[in-house]
Image (cartoon, coloured by chain):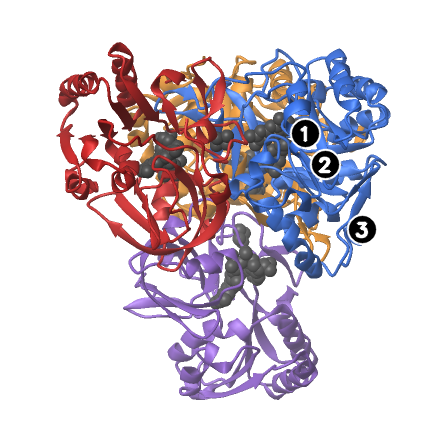
Chain colours: A purple, B orange, C blue, D red
């Protein structure tokens, strides 16, 4: 497992630089530079606007989508009260941010690596592709429901081989599952990295096991602290022990986690 | 300004203590502030044997609060003493062990393991375990049981201060506090969480695998303040205030009604440097109350 | 869709009832919606004699909630019957009288005044009195007293349904519900407010003239839901859910755990047409729970 | 006492048209027309932005500063959580508004009427002046602490005789109290209308009693419902009975209220 660089982890109050809103409820949020150039894609941060008040007790976890010397970007979908309120940020508003948290995806050089993204699971792969030492070894397969323009897919496709699979209706699902399974099987000898909804991850975990493919899965859980303290976000690891997704994940080896 | 507080044989550099279960073993927060600046740290509930805790989901956000049913997942008291305690700044900050057990005997044994540890400043006894022998009600809901457990812990504490942590899920919390006092407690801390529940109409299921859980956060502050007020008037031993404290002003409210110190729980999730910020904010907040010392503020509420 | 609910001899066109003390005598809300659309209205607490209530300040806003210590200010039961009841649409909407008294005798006398009133659909007995400073526990905290008061009211209710309103400030609310059932109650309603307090560090005074008050609002919803869950499993009589309900979804949560109907209190202050809007929202919210009738949803929570 | 026109009282969701922020924390809030042309100055409304969520349990009461066929305007100072959040409204946001509530000030024709405003107490008098049938009989005396440009004073001075008294330091207070007392005494035979902080109102009440001047005072209280239902906002009337400030006030005859 990748160990995070603890010295970087701090709470900061970052100014909001501007929102780009895509169609419907998909939002890219850019904050001033937190100094995370050394983050590992797959790591996340907890976000909480300073003016939130007390109704929502927790920050909200989001994958770091990309970070450079200028700024850090998150990419999220509006699904509830917290994400809705995030879209009401005004330029200059400060957001309390702690991170980078958890571990990230492995990024071995010159290793054929299949990136499987389901919906918002595409977020961490944007930075992954940008930072990978040998991006020509990467291939992205992106399963999505909303229109492709809702996601930062095109700019990723410009950099690596990429294919998108559109789930237009629930009837498409069986074909998509088959396709994902085939992709995992075909990745034998390489590495599979996956981020997306739970059923998507389960399909990949089973296929990886069946075809003996090395895979890493990024999990989601409701999180209160984000730093391993509250024990609210646990899953079971390979030894059937409860481990914190925020601190021991969110990226797990596929054979070391119960979904 | 003098932020120091002294009670139950403890001397804290300020009245801000982090609450059990919300600050891990302290080590998780080292990146966010200097642990030495805190008045104290109550570590996650410890049991004799390691515990895996409850199944997921374990936490739910509620309006201005949260429910938790962690189920005291912990590595066991021995792992704590061996792996965590040596890493904590226990010479500078009071490290308080939180004890969880389901019988007086077990509480005694837990105490036995911790009593000799120099790094442990005090023991906080969590009596919220359902007492299986007496029909499911928790120990903490039965004054007689509270006295018994307190006596057992006190007997084996070898002079370490014993703090009994009280549950608000009772008709008369002052009675429970007196029961702890009668058992020899050096202090009481309150409140633990209120019993609550949340359900999802879409799945028609409870939102916690454990069905019920403990409510904490600003939502419960008025209840906590009332409990501390009642208990301060009922016992002579010191009282530590807990429940929904999210600012230095909240902390002083509890001290105003009579608390000797406070614990900060759910607020640590608002931002992980919250407890440190509260220490920083104390002096300017004391000015609002026209107080130079914590001591002069303590219990100075004017009643009509 | 069928929103009708039937229980305790009452037939309501929907399960949304406004809670005592938060909807005045209903008349104050006539500009904001058609009172006939509500399932029911519980009027402000009534006492035998007019009451001036507590001194000011009486209300404080708290995180996701509020404290009140109104002290049952009311014009007395006779003025209600004479001046208010005739103006209410009691043929279309259940008008429930909320009874406040400080002895079983007084409760009986109050019942005597109301039992003959055609416009009163049911009597709700407030045994909690959390706002009134009394040396010891209130009626509602003593099961024996609950049974006694219930019997007294029942005896003189001449067949009108008697609902006993339970306090959450007890160790075991299921026990209190059973005590009401034993006394002959036709239903129980819960929860009344949680006892709470707020102080001002600037003035060093309590924020309520009465020092303590009752906590209500979304903050307490998890506690209320847990109480209703426990009571529904403890008694056979119908249960009315109250506490922090601010949306049709909240209402269905209480019905899911077993409530026959709900009361909406503090939410009426969020906007005065809130109860009417909840009635409007019920059908589409029932779709989320895949339910066509309230009856099929009632108590359909799946426990692990 | 003026009885309100009940048929007008409704809950509405009004779009926010724009904020004018004066220096520091004084804000004028303009909402789309609620159809309150018939309101009585001195009446108020309860305001609550739709997106507020649940942390604040109550709406907030504000005097109707002015209303016409286009819009309604409130004028307030940022003093706490609710007023602070009001300043975060975005154009187009909806505000839940119920009103007009309570009674208003008397507005007898051709009667010398002294308007005594303390601080934010100036708000209702703006509409009062605009609507008065015989404004030449009005005189405004305005006691204030913040700079005069924080208040809509100048535009009122353009319409009626007006004087401002600046309380620059607490040392000015005794002089100001004396002045107010003298003004009330001088209004004998006419009418005094007052709105402002409690000590200000007390001074006026005492002076009115002493000099037997007809006076009306607008009171403030924390309010939950605003419609007379919760009994949280009571004061004592002349018979020592608790009456709701929201429903029986906020404007009281000076000799029929205990301050
Ligand atoms: C490590 C990590 C990284 C994440 N990265 C991203 C990201 O890059 N982009 C993105 O859009 N989302 C991401 N998520 C999910 C994101 O945290 C949730 O969508 C967000 O917290 C919802 O907040 P809310 O207040 O809007 O919803 P709430 O009102 O809290 O809930 C709305 C709905 O979302 C569900 N939900 C709430 N929290 C979570 C959660 N943590 N995970 C899954 N479902 C949840 C609830 O059950 C409910 O159905 C990530 C989650 C984790 C744990
Ligand atoms: C009928 C009426 C008309 C009003 N008209 C105006 C107006 O035109 N312009 C204006 O600026 N203000 C007016 N007020 C006062 C205004 O309602 C309060 O300033 C506002 O509610 C404060 O809300 P908050 O959330 O910002 O403050 P909070 O966080 O609720 O409280 C901040 C401070 O203000 C005090 N406060 C809270 N509510 C009130 C209140 N209702 N009255 C007095 N003090 C209060 C609190 O005690 C505290 O000290 C009026 C009040 C009433 C009752
Ligand atoms: C996630 C979580 C875990 C907790 N674990 C414990 C525990 O192990 N032992 C204990 O005595 N109290 C535990 N508590 C209760 C807190 O210590 C505290 O009493 C309570 O949360 C009220 O304070 P607050 O409102 O500041 O959070 C826990 C609370 C939370 C939220
Ligand atoms: C201002 C106020 C006044 C109340 N008065 C009464 C009362 O007279 N009688 C009573 O039984 N309950 C009274 N209650 C309690 C409510 O009816 C209700 O039980 C409680 O507020 C919880 O519900 P809620 O969270 O929806 O408000 C009052 C509550 C409030 C907020
Ligand atoms: S969110 Fe607290 S342990 Fe993971
Ligand atoms: S605010 Fe409710 S009665 Fe006045």
Residue A48 locus on image (x, y percent): 42, 53
Instruction: Decide which of C237, C283 is in the foreground and name it.
Output: C283
Q: What's the chain of the residue with tag 1? A: C
Cβ–Cβ under 8 Å for marks 2 and 1: yes
Q: Which mark is residue C90?
A: 2
Mark toward the start of the polypeptide (3 vs 1): 1
Spatial CA distance of label 3 from label 1 is 30 Å
Residue C107 locus on image (x, y percent): 74, 17
Q: Residue at x 39, y 22 (%)?
A: B5
Mark toward the start of the polypeptide (2 vs 1): 1
Residue B209 locus on image (x, y percent): 70, 51
Image-quadrant location for residue D193: top left
- Asked whether the viewer can see residue A14, the reply is yes
Discs 2 and 3 lie in a common subunit: yes
Q: Which mark is residue C295?
A: 3
Spatial CA distance of label 2 from label 3 is 24 Å
Which quadrant of the figure contains the N terminus of chain D?
top left
Q: What's the chain of the residue with tag 3? A: C
Q: Under 8 Å from ligand 4: the CB of mark 2?
A: no
Q: Please, what secondary structure does the residue beneath circle 3 have?
A: helix
Q: Residue furthest front?
A: D110
Q: Residue at x 52, y 15 (%)?
A: B237
Mark toward the start of the polypeptide (2 vs 3): 2
- Asked whether the viewer can see residue A249, the reply is no
Q: What's the chain of the residue with tag 2? A: C
């Amino acid at each position: 497992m990748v160990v995070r660089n603890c010295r970087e982890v701090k709470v900061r109050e970052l100014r909001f630089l501007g929102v780009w809103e895509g169609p419907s409820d998909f939002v890219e949020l850019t904050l001033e530079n937190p100094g995370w150039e050394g983050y590992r894609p797959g790591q996340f941060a907890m976000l909480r606007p300073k003016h939130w008040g007390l109704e929502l007790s927790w920050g909200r976890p989001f994958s770091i989508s990309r970070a450079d010397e200028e700024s850090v970007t998150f990419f999220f979908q509006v699904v509830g009260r917290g994400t809705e309120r995030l879209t009401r940020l005004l330029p200059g508003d400060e957001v309390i941010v702690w991170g980078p948290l958890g571990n990230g995806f492995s990024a071995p050089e010159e290793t054929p690596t299949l990136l499987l993204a389901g919906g918002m699971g595409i977020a961490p792969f944007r930075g992954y592709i940008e930072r990978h030492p040998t991006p020509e070894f990467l291939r992205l397969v992106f399963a999505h429901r909303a229109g492709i323009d809702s996601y930062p897919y095109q700019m990723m496709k410009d950099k690596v081989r990429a294919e998108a699979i559109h789930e237009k209706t629930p009837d498409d699902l069986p074909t998509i599952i088959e396709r994902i399974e085939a992709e995992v099987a075909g990745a034998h000898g390489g590495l599979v990295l996956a981020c997306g909804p739970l059923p998507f991850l389960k399909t990949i975990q089973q296929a990886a096991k069946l075809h003996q493919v090395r895979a890493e899965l990024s999990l989601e859980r409701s999180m209160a602290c984000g730093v391993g303290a509250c024990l609210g976000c646990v899953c079971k690891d390979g030894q059937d022990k409860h481990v914190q997704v925020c601190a021991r994940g969110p990226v797990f080896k596929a054979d070391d986690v119960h979904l | 300004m003098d932020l120091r507080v002294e009670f139950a044989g403890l001397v804290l550099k300020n009245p801000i203590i982090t609450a059990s279960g919300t600050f891990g073993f302290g080590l998780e927060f080292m990146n966010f502030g200097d642990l030495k600046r805190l008045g104290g740290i109550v570590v996650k509930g410890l049991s004799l044997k390691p515990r895996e805790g409850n199944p997921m989901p374990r936490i739910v956000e509620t309006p201005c609060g949260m429910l938790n049913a962690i189920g005291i997942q912990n590595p066991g008291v021995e792992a704590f003493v061996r792996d965590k305690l040596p890493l904590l700044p226990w010479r500078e900050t009071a490290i308080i062990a939180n004890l969880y057990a389901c019988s007086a005997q077990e509480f005694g044994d837990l105490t036995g393991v911790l009593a000799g540890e120099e790094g442990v400043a005090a023991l906080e006894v969590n009596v919220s375990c359902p007492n299986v022998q007496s029909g499911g009600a928790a120990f903490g809901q039965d004054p007689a049981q509270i006295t018994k457990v307190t006596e057992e812990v006190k007997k084996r504490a070898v002079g370490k201060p014993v703090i009994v942590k009280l549950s608000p899920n009772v008709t008369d919390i002052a009675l429970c506090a007196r029961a702890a006092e009668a058992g020899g407690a050096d202090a009481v801390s309150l409140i633990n969480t209120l019993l609550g529940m949340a359900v999802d109409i879409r799945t028609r299921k409870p939102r916690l695998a454990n069905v019920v859980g403990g409510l904490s956060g600003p939502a419960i502050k008025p209840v906590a303040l009332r409990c501390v007020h009642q208990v301060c008037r009922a016992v002579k031993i010191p009282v530590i205030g807990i429940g929904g404290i999210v600012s230095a002003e909240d902390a002083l409210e509890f001290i105003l009604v009579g608390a000797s110190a406070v614990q900060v729980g759910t607020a640590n999730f608002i931002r992980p440097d919250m407890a440190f910020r509260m220490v920083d904010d104390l002096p300017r907040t004391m000015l609002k109350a026209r107080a130079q010392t914590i001591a002069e503020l303590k219990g100075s509420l004017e009643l009509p």
